[in-house]
Image: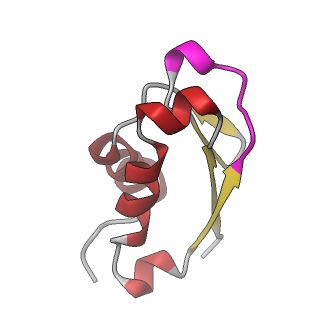
Amino acid sequence: MKRIKIELCQGTSCHLLGCRELADAVNSLPASRRDQIDLCMADCLKSCRKGPNVRINGTIFSGMTPDGLLTILEEHFCLTAAD
């Protein structure tokens, strides 16, 4: 399966709006799912007023929540929290 690249914006605005909780959500996935993900931090995704922002395989998602991120992974990448 193709790996999923997730970049979490760690700019000041996104940091204050919850990028750490997004990282925690990804890290809470079972190891078999987590192994399919390259998770990294990005300096700024240039959508500060819409944060927190996430770039998944090149597509930016704004106003992200932990549940929203897990839903995107499940719906678009067939990556569920189940083992």
Residue 78, placed above or below residue 69: below
* Residue occupying image coordinates x 34% and y 53%: 70
Choose top left, top right, bottom left or bottom right for residue 73.
Answer: bottom left
* Residue occupying image coordinates x 53% and y 82%: 35
> Between 3 and 10, which is closer to the camera in this rendering?
10
Residue 78 seen in the figure: no
x and y percent of residue 69 in the render?
39, 46
Image quarter in which the C terminus is found: bottom left
- Residue at the extreme top: 49
Q: Left or right: 58 with respect to 64?
A: right
x and y percent of residue 21 in the render?
37, 51
* Residue occupying image coordinates x 75% and y 41%: 43
Picture colour scheme: secondary structure
* Residue occupying image coordinates x 33% and y 40%: 68
Q: Is residue 79 one of those drawn in magenta?
A: no
Q: Left or right: 7 with respect to 79?
A: right
Residue 17, placed above or below residue 31: above
Residue 61, placed above or below residue 82: above
Q: Which residues are the magenta region?
A: 42-50
Image quarter in which the N terminus is found: bottom right
x and y percent of residue 59 in the render?
65, 36
x and y percent of residue 57 in the render?
68, 49
Residue 71 seen in the figure: yes
> Between 76 and 11, which is closer to the camera in this rendering?
11
Q: Left or right: 71 with respect to 61?
A: left
Choose top left, top right, bottom left or bottom right for residue 40.
Answer: bottom right
The number of discs equals 0
Q: Is residue 45 one of those drawn in magenta?
A: yes
Choose top left, top right, bottom left or bottom right for residue 25.
Answer: bottom left
